[in-house]
Image (cartoon, helix red, strand yellow):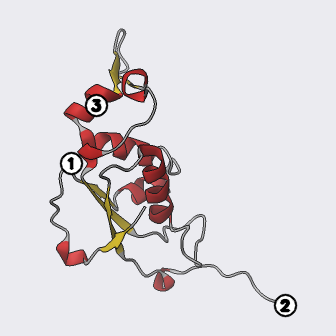
Amino acid sequence: MNKTFVAKKEDIKRSWYLVDAKDKILGRLAAKIATILRGKHKAIFTPYLDTGDGVIVINAAKIRITGRKLKQKVYRRYSGYPGGLREVNLETMLKNKPTKVIELAVTRMLPSGPLGRDLVKKLKIYADDKHHHQAQNPVILEV
């Protein structure tokens, strides 16, 4: 009888991937990044462990948005105070904080809780094509 494989800390080997977001569709890109952060692309995937790899995203400001989402998609946050609801549409968010758009898309595809918070720490996003993670020897990933 075969036993179910469960990954241990010493089984997990981490690597880094470099993703160029230029002319990539936001949702498809975020789904691929979330899969890699979670570790679902590996044979040793374990749901309650962080078996994933790190991801570096460049050219976040040049992402592609389809349909009428630029005007219609709204990001909301609430301060907790009366009248504290803040709304920003996607077009404004891309202009002011292009990295936040990808960060929110990926974060919302990951589990909430301690595991999800640990996974997000391995995501590095840059608006232009410069990054300072050469020491990680990132592998270029085609999405």
Farthest residue, direction top: 83
Q: Nearer the viewer, mark 2 or mark 3?
A: 3
* Mark 2 vs mark 1: in front: 1
Residue shown at 25%/40% (left/top)?
98
Q: Residue 91 lies in what quarter of the image? A: top left
Neighbor class of circle 2 (other Cα within 10 Å; few <14, some 14-19, many 20+) is few
N-terminal label among 2 and 1: 2
Look at mark 2 in the image and give the residue it sits on. Answer: 1
Give the spatial CA distance, label 3 vs label 1: 12 Å
Query: Which of 143/38 is in front?
Result: 143
Give the residue pinned by disc 1: 127
The residue that appears at 26% across and 26% down in the rendered structure is 92
Q: Which residue is mark 3?
A: 93
Give the total number of marks visible in the rendering.
Answer: 3
Disc 3 and disc 1 in contact, CB within 8 angstroms: no
- Judge left or right: residue 63 versus residue 35: left
Q: CA distance from mark 2 to mark 3?
A: 55 Å
Disc 1 residue type?
Ala
Tell which of 118 and 140 is nearer to you.
140
Mark 2 falls on what kind of element? loop
Mark 3: secondary structure: helix
Provide residue 129's location: percent of width, then percent of height: 18, 57
